[in-house]
Image (cartoon, coloured by chain):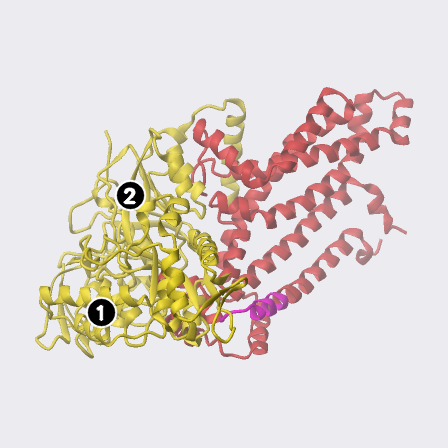
């Protein structure tokens, strides 16, 4: 409370100053702390909860890193190899790496940390890990039950970030963030605020920016005004209206990158009405993606021509025919599938109406609006749909109990840098919480199994990916709507910042002050 | 006077009983309401913890197993009440932090905001109301009426954005949002305080008019006091009673109803925390934050009662033999 009272007293003095002279104060002088603002709150210290905030701020590291196209790069592990049977992976750690409490990053510490990351939803739980062992001070081995080629990619996920033993309470919960990155936490007040300073004992190149700070601000308007006023140096998660306001302002520049995230409709293809691919095609043809892109996302180029965005070059198939908007064709397909148009919507030969329920959630503010647009566009095609806005968990739950008909979501295919992991989760033999439902294609199953085992020649892997992408494109177990573009407002006083299309890092170590 | 019959003791005893009853009722009601909400609890908690990119059935199963959510509802409620008797509010199901720890941080931020808003309202509203009340129909009266109408009509959301645009963006005088920068308290407290000041000015005016028209003021002037002396010695004290009561009620509303302003200014207040707890089906956090809000309500009432008791000798003498 003493802190609170101090704050009040100080602020009231400032109020007096503002009341007398409403002029520029110290708030305008460029502080040497790099302020980031984004919409993501720190929901807990467990790596699977908010680990991404600490990896993005380069406070914590993962064993592996990735290039923009997802190719694995060394992280805390400087090299690795895999046994001939594909089941044992050996990693060599950076020998001079230190945790922020000064202790060395040993294989034993990393093994203890990663052994706690084997429970869902930590991505390492997908790899079928048998055990993780320290074979020497800097030698770590991960033993798998079956070959899993994308293991380096899974280890790059923030849920597998490496924390020092001092981070854990006796019950195994995380009580502090003691990482090994170039920045160390100096102040952490969840759910909104974290400050970090340069870690002097970092074993690689020291960054120029010495102090960084992150604030979670829920409203896009707030983030935009923080950028415009100069309070924020990097403002993430700008919506279309904020973007329009900031464009052309002298103090900020906007950088954008297409993310490997697709706004899509998850379809329950096990339902009698939706089992027929002609109905799914008709639903897709009735969607005006350009209109949604233009009116809601203010960017018609984001209309999805296929499931995988061009920012996933290994998965985006240029030769696939783009998804079209053709209400006439949709009508014909529905009629050929036995649906007749009546004043109250579509009915089958027995007079049963086609009524669909579309579930979505407001965590991404554009989703409920897109759901309403879909409802209106389908109504023009005679398809009646109700929109239910609830919690993001309702879609996986509806997948499990079979009650879901349609779900509108924004799926990140680069949850880990290799999209094959997420695609395996979504389109594997049993479908996926955020992917196929009541739909299976043996050719896709086979291709995914081979990709997940690894040891596939580059040419063959490309063919397998093309087979998966084209099968999904033709059968539409999920219907792509739009891709997603990340916009960031960057203060002009900051140079060297680039955007990470995989959203893994704010790349603070490359930033420098202008002048 | 018997100590038990003393008005202050009676007041504290009454409010103390209210706190205990409130804890039982609020805790139980919150628990029952959270349990009665549609949807699977483990899935909601998993969504709250891991967000939409990682939530799934495997995550929900892991949460269910970790938190033993299959325990019968009555048993979980009894456990909570027993823990509450030991002053333990439990652990957040989403963040894993002790609820006390989270609530204290949020309550501190909320109290900062509330006290600053009330101070701003008092500093601006009371003098404006006194000026208006001294000369009904004068320029001060008309101006405060106009300001009151305008400020009460503007939604807090819009006022906040206007203040951000003018004070923070155009003048660069204060930070737009956040909790840790110098002066960051001022814009959110001005947003709340200006609306409150508008109402307070009108209440002060009306209350002062009543006081000025009362027989004791007439008597004070008849015995030779100047208008100013009569006002300062007798009128203001009488007029302050409704003002204090009004401030008390609105301070509670501010503390508990500032969710929009907290969200917009990224202020880590308790209203913001309660909304997130409800979305994440974080039952101990819902119970803890609601309980704190309830205790806050009773505490504010106690403060208002004490202030009125101190100002009004008639109330102190009520229980006297």
| Closer to us: A265 or A322 | A322
Say left or right for A65 vs A167: left
| Closer to us: B126 or A368 | A368
Q: Locate residue A426: give its quadrant.
A: bottom left
Q: Is residue A451 magenta?
A: no
Say which residue label 1 marks.
A111
Q: Secondary structure at mark 1?
A: helix
Q: Chain letter of disc 1?
A: A
Q: x and y percent of residue A348 in the render?
A: 47, 72
Q: Residues within 10 Å of mark 2 (few under 14, many from 20)?
A: some
Q: Chain letter of disc 2?
A: A
Say which colour chain A has: yellow
Q: Locate residue B176: give its quadrant.
A: top left
Q: Residues within 10 Å of mark 1 (few under 14, many from 20)?
A: some
Q: Nearer the viewer, mark 2 or mark 1?
A: 2
Say which residue label 2 marks.
A256
Q: Is residue A310 above or below residue A115?
A: above
Say left or right for B20 vs A191: right
Say left or right for B157 vs A443: right
Q: Find the distance from the CA under tag 2 to the CA under tag 1.
A: 38 Å
Q: Locate residue B67: give its quadrant.
A: bottom left
> Which residue is drawn at the image coordinates 60% and 67% (left, top)?
B33
Q: Report the predominant secondary structure element of the magenta stretch.
A: helix
The magenta region covers B28-40
Q: x and y percent of residue A187 in the render?
A: 37, 49
Q: Name the N-terminal-most of marks 2 and 1.
A: 1
Q: x and y percent of residue A288 in the render?
A: 38, 52
Q: Which chain is red?
A: B
């Amino acid at each position: 409370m003493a802190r609170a009272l101090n704050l009040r007293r100080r602020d009231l003095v400032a109020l007096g100053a503002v009341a007398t002279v409403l002029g520029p104060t110290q708030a305008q002088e460029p502080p040497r702390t790099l302020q980031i603002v984004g919409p993501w709150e720190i929901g807990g210290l467990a790596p699977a909860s908010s680990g991404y905030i600490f990896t993005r701020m380069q406070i914590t590291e993962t064993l592996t890193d990735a290039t923009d196209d997802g190719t694995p790069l060394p992280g805390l592990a400087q090299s690795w190899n895999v046994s001939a049977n594909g089941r044992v992976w050996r990693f060599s750690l950076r020998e001079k790496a230190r945790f922020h409490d000064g202790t060395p990053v040993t294989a034993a510490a990393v093994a203890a940390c990663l052994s706690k990351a084997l429970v869902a939803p930590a991505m390492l739980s997908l790899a079928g890990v048998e055990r993780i062992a320290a074979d020497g001070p800097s030698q770590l081995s991960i033993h798998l039950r079956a070959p899993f080629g994308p293991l380096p990619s899974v280890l790059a996920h923030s849920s597998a970030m490496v924390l020092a033993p001092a981070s854990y309470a006796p019950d195994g919960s995380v009580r502090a963030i003691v990482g090994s990155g170039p920045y160390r936490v100096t102040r952490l007040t969840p759910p909104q605020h974290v400050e970090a300073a340069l870690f002097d004992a970092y074993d690689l190149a020291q960054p120029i920016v010495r102090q960084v700070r992150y604030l979670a601000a829920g409203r896009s308007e707030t983030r935009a005004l923080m950028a415009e006023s100069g309070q924020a140096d990097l403002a993430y998660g700008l919506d279309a209206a904020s973007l329009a306001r900031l464009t052309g302002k002298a103090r900020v520049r906007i950088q954008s990158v297409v993310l490997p995230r697709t706004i899509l409709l998850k379809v329950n293809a096990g339902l009698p009405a939706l089992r027929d691919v002609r109905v799914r095609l008709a639903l897709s043809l009735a969607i005006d993606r350009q209109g949604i892109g233009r009116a809601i996302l203010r960017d018609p180029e984001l209309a999805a021509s296929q499931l995988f965005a061009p920012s996933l070059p290994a998965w985006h198939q240029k030769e696939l025919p783009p998804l079209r908007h053709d209400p006439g064709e949709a009508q014909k397909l529905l009629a050929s599938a036995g649906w007749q148009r009546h004043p109250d919507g579509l009915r089958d030969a027995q007079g049963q109406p086609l009524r669909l329920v579309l579930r979505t959630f407001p965590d991404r503010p554009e989703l409920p609006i897109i759901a309403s647009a879909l409802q209106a566009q389908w109504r023009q095609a005679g398809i009646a749909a109700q929109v239910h806005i609830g919690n993001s968990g309702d879609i996986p739950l509806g997948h499990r109990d079979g009650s879901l008909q349609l779900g509108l979501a924004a799926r990140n295919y680069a949850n880990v840098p290799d999209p094959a992991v997420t695609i395996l989760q979504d389109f594997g033999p049993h479908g996926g919480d955020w992917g196929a439902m009541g739909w299976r294609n043996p050719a896709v199953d086979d291709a995914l199994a081979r990709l997940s085992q690894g040891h596939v020649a580059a040419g063959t892997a490309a063919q397998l990916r093309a087979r998966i992408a084209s099968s999904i494109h033709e059968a539409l177990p999920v219907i792509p709507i739009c891709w997603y573009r990340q916009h960031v407002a960057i203060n002009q006083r900051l140079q060297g910042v680039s955007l990470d299309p995989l959203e893994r890092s704010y790349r603070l170590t490359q930033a420098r002050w202008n002048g | 006077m018997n100590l038990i019959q003393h008005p202050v003791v009676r007041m504290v005893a009454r409010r103390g009983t209210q706190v205990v009853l409130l804890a039982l009722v609020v805790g139980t009601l919150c628990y029952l309401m959270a349990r009665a909400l549609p949807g699977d609890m483990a899935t909601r908690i998993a969504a709250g913890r891991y967000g939409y990119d990682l939530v799934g059935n495997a995550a929900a199963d892991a949460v269910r197993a970790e938190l033993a959510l299959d325990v019968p509802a009555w048993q979980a409620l009894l456990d909570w009440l027993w823990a509450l008797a030991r002053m333990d509010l439990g652990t957040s199901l989403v963040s894993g932090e002790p609820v006390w720890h989270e609530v204290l941080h949020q309550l501190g931020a909320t109290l900062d905001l509330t006290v600053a808003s009330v101070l701003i309202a008092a500093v601006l509203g009371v003098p404006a109301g006194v000026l208006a009340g001294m000369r009904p129909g004068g320029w001060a009266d008309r101006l405060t009426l106009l300001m009151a109408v305008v400020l009460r009509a503007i939604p807090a959301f819009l006022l906040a954005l206007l203040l951000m645009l003018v004070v923070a963006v155009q003048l660069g005088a204060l930070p737009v949002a956040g909790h840790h920068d110098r002066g960051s308290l001022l814009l959110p407290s001005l947003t709340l305080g200006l609306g409150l000041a508008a109402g307070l000015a009108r209440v002060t005016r009306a209350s002062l008019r009543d006081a000025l028209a009362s027989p004791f003021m007439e008597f004070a002037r008849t015995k030779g006091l100047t208008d100013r002396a009569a006002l300062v010695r007798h009128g203001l004290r009488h007029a302050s009673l409704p003002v204090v009561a009004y401030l008390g009620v609105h301070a509670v509303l501010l503390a508990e109803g500032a969710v929009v302003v907290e969200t917009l200014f990224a202020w880590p207040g308790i209203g913001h925390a309660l909304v997130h707890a409800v979305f994440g089906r974080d039952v101990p956090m819902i119970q803890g934050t609601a309980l704190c809000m309830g205790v806050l309500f009773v505490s504010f009432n106690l403060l208002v009662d004490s202030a009125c008791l101190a100002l009004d000798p008639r109330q102190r003498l009520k229980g006297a033999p």
